[in-house]
Amino acid sequence: SSSSQQLVDKSANKLPLQALLSGKLLVAWTSRIKASDEERRRKAVETWQRASHAVNSLQWDVTHFSSSRMAATLRVLSQLPGLEDYLSACPADERAGMLQAVGRYCAFMERAGNGKTRYHAARVVEAEHRPTLLCTMMTSRPAEHTALISLLDDLIDDDDRPGR
């Protein structure tokens, strides 16, 4: 489908690296680099080129005006304080695992269609307790997970289930 194709298409909405960065900080950095020795300037140019290549090699359309599921999901995740710090410090396999999890979530939501989900739409869990439920779902053993899902399903009356 075309919407799931948005997850893998190379972005037509390219942004240059300088568009992603704070203009004020970029101007100050440029001034510091210009005032530094030749070796520091050379390293800064190499760093800029590598970082630009990373941004230009992006395989997903996730710019601020994209309507892809991946872009919408990343906009929500980008609100988490410290996520950039974590991604800057964690090993490559953890970064890849996070991308894989986000990609699988997006594919699941595409299959669900229009964001219609059972538990959220039926308000099975109080909003302030959703983090506890999410953690329980991620950490419970298979038998406990099955029991929890069975209970959640039973709480939703047939008339209240989305899509019925």
Image: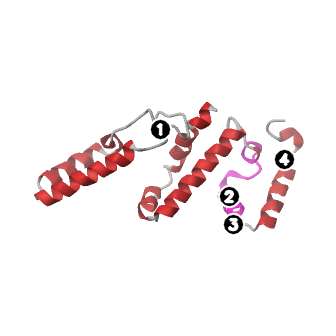
Where's residue 118, x and y in %? Answer: 76, 44
Tell me which numbered mark, 1 or 3, is placed earlier along the sequence: 1
**Residue 69 counted in the magenta span:** no
The residues tagged by marks 4 and 3 sit, at their Cα atoms, a distance apart of 23 Å
Mark identifier at residue 139: 3
The residues tagged by marks 4 and 1 sit, at their Cα atoms, a distance apart of 40 Å
Mark identifier at residue 156: 4
Residue type indicated by callout 2: Leu
Q: Which residue is mark 1?
A: 10
Mark identifier at residue 134: 2
The segment highlighted magenta reads: 119-139
Nearer the camera: disc 1 or disc 3: 1
Residue type indicated by callout 4: Ile
Nearer the camera: disc 2 or disc 1: 1
SS for callout 1? loop
**Residue 126 counted in the magenta span:** yes
